[in-house]
Amino acid sequence: MPQISPRAAETSGERSAAVLTIGGVTAAFAAAACCALPVLLTGAGIGSAWLGGIGSVAAPHRNLLLWLSVFSLTAGAVLLFRVQRAAIACGAGGGCTPRWLRALLLLGLVSGATLLWLGYSYV
């Protein structure tokens, strides 16, 4: 049975974490588009008319989008944690996941969690 190299496994984890993070942020954005984002953007003086189309399509599926976002963001966080552990074990001289990519994934997870909270709390 062929063995998978540690770098190949880490690259797979990076891709999976990125895909799940993007999916979670997208689902959370769609869930927040009907109510929370228009209120916040209008309060900040930014036009939010462009969210009307997204919100009207996403509103009937709000609960599904919230659960999809919870699943995607949680799985993305677990995978990012694994990639972070592998990067720490790799050391300074190894060819591990770049720090900027891990920081970008963390920023995406935090943004997605914020959108998720906004989509859940604003009805």
Image (cartoon, rainbow, N blue to C red):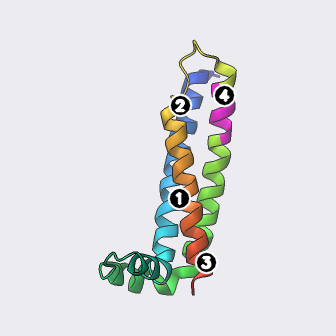
**Which comes sooner in the sequence, label 2 or label 3?**
2
Locate the N terminus by quadrant: top right
**Which comes sooner in the sequence, label 4 or label 2?**
4
The residue labelled by disc 4 is 86
Q: Position of residue 34 (x, y in %)?
A: 45, 83
Q: CA distance from mark 2 to mark 3?
A: 31 Å
Stretch in magenta: 81-87
Q: CA distance from mark 4 to mark 1?
A: 24 Å
Callout 3: helix, strand or loop? helix
Q: Position of residue 36 (x, y in %)?
A: 50, 79
Q: Is residue 52 left or right of residue 27?
A: left
Q: Is residue 76 above or below residue 46?
A: above
Which residue is located at x 62 percent, y 80 percent? 121
The residue labelled by disc 3 is 120
Tell me, yes or no, whether the two marked residues, 4 and 2, touch with CB atoms within 8 Å: no
The residue labelled by disc 2 is 99
- Marker disc for residue 9: none
The residue labelled by disc 1 is 111
